Amino acid sequence: MRVAARPRWTLRRRLVVVVVALVAVVAAAMGTLSTLALSTSLTTQLDEKLTAAHRRTVDAPTVGSRVSGEAFGPAPQPAGPYRPGQDAGTVTVEQPAGTDPADLTIDQAYYIADDGTPTALDDAQVSQLLAVPTDGEPVALTLSGLGGHRAIASMTPDGGTAVTALPTTSVTSTLTSFVAVEVVVAALALLVAAAAGMVLVRRELRPLDRVVGTANRVARLPLDRGEVVLADRVPAQDTDPATEVGQVGAALNELLGHVEQALGARQESESQVRQFVADASHELRTPLASIRGYAELVRRSPDEVPASALHAMARVESESQRMTVLLEDMLLLARLDAGRPLVSEPVDLTVLAIDAVADAHAAGPDHDWRLDLSPQDAVVVGDDHRLRQVLANLLSNARLHTPAGTAVTVRVRRTGDRIVLQVTDDGPGIPPALRESLFQRFTRGDASRNSATGSTGLGLAIVHAVVTAHGGTITVSSGPGTTFTVTLPAAT
Ligand SMILES: Nc1ncnc2c1ncn2[C@@H]1O[C@H](COP(=O)(O)OP(=O)(O)O)[C@@H](O)[C@H]1O
Ligand SMILES: [Mg+2]
């Protein structure tokens, strides 16, 4: 068997093998025991026959009267046993006291051949037979040239020795066919056990497959973000606590229930935080607008306030300007986080790129703005306003974080069913310390929070959120020079 060869077996295979092995052991034990019992009982029967035959020999009249067999009955038996009742195969030796074994006649040492004729024994056989202890107990004996026998010997009343033997061929052949039948039956039993074992084990383990199926389906769910619906459960029929598989199924269901609860709670608190950020941003807009308005008012009537206050008011105005941008960005991110559905309309990225470059040119005339468009159409389905914001953020980065004179190229291409939008500049590149967390909120190179650049650190976070919400991806490569690559699914 190839049991040991395989390091890992399925439970199914192991169970079937164990069942078959058990049946094999039981069959072997039963076969051995019943063969032994049969052998003993056949030998006992043979010994009874042998004892009877021996008694007939000892009790019968001796030499002289046997030649024709007439003395034993009216009907002569020309081809029958030498003595009545003597079967073919019976071996007889009668040694009168004092006679040399070599001098025994055919009347005194013979066996009955299969055709019933008495046949002389040779000297070797005679001496084997005479060696049998004369205690009247049957013993096993293999006669040279005649095979296995049971033999019995005793002293005759006149001091001689009488030996009778019977062949064990009948016992052997009965045992042989018995063993053959047993082997065939055992083989059939093994086959049946293997087949039935396979079917039963498969059927019994099917509930386990269903439990595994549920676990696998749940494992494939994206549990780490967004609204999670964890409705999948192990079917009720596989949660019977009376069975082992049922216990596993019930435990899994309980686990799923807890996980669903925990995810729900997490979701709840997350959306509360988001809602709070959105509400706070929204609420702050109005007072901020007032602050801006009053600051502007003061600036427009410069004669009524001292110069120092005027300067302070200018700062208030610019800071509130920056804060407005920050609030708008936070509000937008909070909305994107909430996963609100986007507007879905065909948007031509070529048009967007042209507009964005025109705007960037107006805002930063010192940079060298370039467009690289392809004649293929570059239409995606999405939110025009948000996608414009993606381009505006990328281009404002290229303008604000690179020195004057930097060349910035906006490239739009279609590759297969995707539209690829690239913004490349040959500026100084992104500081290595920033690259890991570039798309995270409040990641920015200008740590001084100086208002000069209007840097909030939210620009790329918004780009990432918008692109992801459109089912796209964004990557960045930066050595010297920086390339942002946005890939969006093309409209079909
Ligand atoms: N094209 C670029 N070249 C060099 N640095 C860049 C470029 N784009 C972005 N960065 C760096 O990445 C940081 C994060 O950008 P962003 O999220 O848009 O925030 P912000 O522009 O408000 O600082 C920037 O502060 C800047 O240091
Ligand atoms: Mg930016």
Image (cartoon, rainbow, N blue to C red):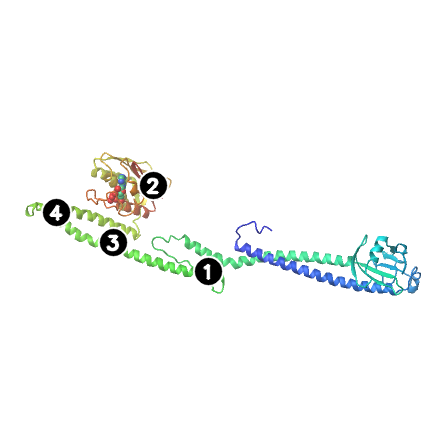
Look at label 2 and name its amino acid: Ile
Which residue, given by chain and number where applicable, does mark 3 sit on? 278
- The front one of 198 and 352 is 198
Q: Is residue 433 left or right of residue 121?
A: left
* Secondary structure of the residue carrying numbered label 2: strand
* Secondary structure of the residue carrying numbered label 3: helix
* Secondary structure of the residue carrying numbered label 1: helix
- Label annotation for residue 248: 1
Which residue, given by chain and number where applicable, does mark 4 sit on? 312
Look at label 1 and name its amino acid: Val
* Secondary structure of the residue carrying numbered label 4: helix
Quarter of the view holding residue 448: top left
Mark 4 surroundings within 10 Å by alpha-carbon count, few (fewer than 14), some (14 through 19), many (20 or more): few
- First along the sequence among labels 1 and 3: 1
Find residue 435 and report its horizontal and vertical position in percent: 31, 42
| Mark toward the viewer: 1 or 3 | 1
Outermost residue on the left side: it is 303
Q: Is residue 198 visible?
A: no
